[in-house]
Image (spheres, rainbow, N blue to C red):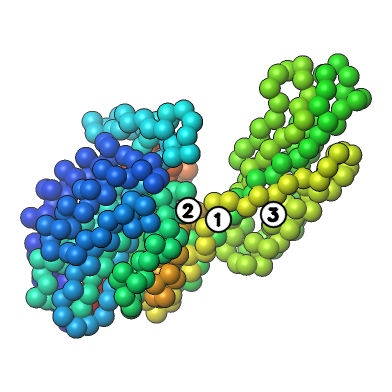
Amino acid sequence: MAECAATFAVLAAAGQARGWQEDLYRDLHQHPELSNQEHRTAGLVADRLGRDGFEVSTGVGGTGVVGVLRNGTGPTVLLRADMDALPVKEDTGLPYASSVTATPTGGGDAVPVAHACGHDMHVTCLLGAAHLLAAGEKHWSGTLVTVFQPAEETVNGAGAMIADGLADLVGPVDVALGQHVAPLPAGRLAAVPGPAFAAADCVRVTVYGRGGHASMPQSTVDPVVLAAAIVLRLQTVVSREIDPGEPAVLTVGSIHAGTKANIIAEQAELQINIRSYSESVRTALLAAIRRIVTAECAASNCPREPDFEMFDQAPLTDNDPEVTARVTEAFTAALGEDVMIAPPRVLGSEDFSDIANGVHAPYSYWLFGGTDPQTYLRAAAEDRLAGDIPVNHSPRFAPVIQPTLDTGTTALVAAALAWLAG
C-alpha cells in the first residue's frame, strides 16, 4: 500500500539521524527541567524544528513549542511529546545521569530533578520523526503538526496550550497521535482501543480538631487519630464498594498534622488520589471519600465541617478504535507482525487527550518499550518483573537508548504516514 512504501522511503534516512538523536537524548537526560520550567528544552526543540523547515511557535501555554510543516493538500496529523521532568534524585549510574537541582515553580526548597518518566525519550523520538518526515516530504502530502507540551507531570500543560489558542494556531486536525515509553521490552509496541490510561483526581481534605496539651487529651479533638481512622476506612472503598471487574485505585499519598510530640494539633491535611476508567466509578469513589470523611468527623465530634479541594485532575485517555486499528496496521507493516505485544492494564494518567479533544480530533496513544529485551525476558522467566524492572517515576528508570529510540521514531513516522501518504 502507498503508506507502507512511503514509510520505508522516509525511514531510509533514519541512519543519518540516529547519531544526533542519541546525542540529543543524552543531553536532555542530563539536563532535565521541572514542569513549566522547560526553557532550555524548548529552545533546543525550536532550533531543531526551525532547521527542518517548520513554522515554529514558542511560548504556547507557557513553555510549549509547536511546529507546523505544510506540504500541499491532504490531512492534518498532530504528533505530541511532553517535555518536563520529575522532582526525583536519579539513581541509574549512567554516565549521563542528571545531577540537576531546581526550585519548584510554586517556590520552596531546591529539589533533585530527573527524567524519571522518559519524556526526554519522547522529545527525541518526535524530533527525529519530524526531521525524517521533513526530509522525505516528496513521499507524502498534507500538514504535519508537532506539539511539544510542557507540564504533563502536573497535568496542566495540555490545558494551558489549548487555553492559549492551540486550536486556532494549527487549524482543523484530522487525527492526534502520541506515545509513552514504558517498562516493556525495547523494540516492542502496545496499543489498545478504548480506555488506555485512567482518569485521575486528587482531593485535598482538611479536617479540624481542637488542639491542646498531650497530657490533657480529654479537652481536645485529636485530628491525628481522626486522620488515621479516615485512612483505614478509605481502604475499604475499592474492595467493598467497587465492582471487582472495574479498575480502580484509591491512595492516601500524604498526611500532615502537628509540629511537636507533646502538642495535639488543631487540624490535619490528607491528600488522596483516585484512578478510574469510567465516570460511574469516579463518581462513586469521590462520593465515598466525602461520605467517609464527613462521617468520621462527626464521630470524632469535630468543631467544624471538613474542607474538600479538587486538584491535579487528569482526563481518561480513551483511544478511538478505528484510529488505533489504523496505527497498529502501520506499525506491523513497518516493523513486523511480532512488534505488537499485549498491552498491560495501565492506571497511570495522561493529559494527552486534552490536546486531542481541544483540537476536536480523534486520537490514539500507545506504549513503546524501553527495557533491555534480554533483561526483561530473564526477569519475566523468573517472575521478577515487579522487583527487577524499574518503572516510570522510579529513581532507577532510564530507557536503554537502542532500540528504544529507533522504535519510537519509526512508530511516529509510520503512524503519521498512515494518513499523510494515504
Residue 377: % across, % down: 35, 48
Q: Secondary structure at mark 3?
A: helix
Three-letter code, disc 1: Gln
Query: Residue at position x 41%, y 50% from top?
Result: 151
In this orientation, does residue 76 appear?
Answer: yes
Residue 132: % across, % down: 14, 63
- Which of the 4 image quadrants contains residue 254? top right
Q: Which residue is mark 2?
A: 155
- Quarter that holds the N terminus: bottom left
Q: Is residue 221 above or below residue 156?
A: above
Q: Residues within 10 Å of mark 2 (few under 14, many from 20)?
A: many
Query: Residue at position x 36%, y 37% from top?
Result: 114
Q: Is residue 7 above or below residue 285?
A: below
Residue 384: % across, % down: 45, 41
Residue 24: % across, % down: 19, 45
Mark identifier at residue 64: none
Q: Earlier in the sequence, mark 1 or mark 3?
A: 3
Q: Which residue is mark 1?
A: 313
| Camera-nearest residue between 310 and 183 | 310
Q: Earlier in the sequence, mark 2 or mark 1?
A: 2
- Quarter that holds the C terminus: bottom left
Three-letter code, disc 3: Val
| Camera-nearest residue between 250 and 38 | 38
- Mark 2 and mark 1: span between their CA atoms? 7 Å
1 vs 3, front mark: 1
Q: Which residue is mark 3?
A: 238
Going by the image, does 327 lie left or right of 202?
left
Asked whether the residues under the numbered discs 2 and 1 touch, taking CB atoms below 8 Å apart as contact, a structural biologist would say yes
| Camera-nearest residue between 313 and 279 | 313
Going by the image, does 159 lie left or right of 28?
right
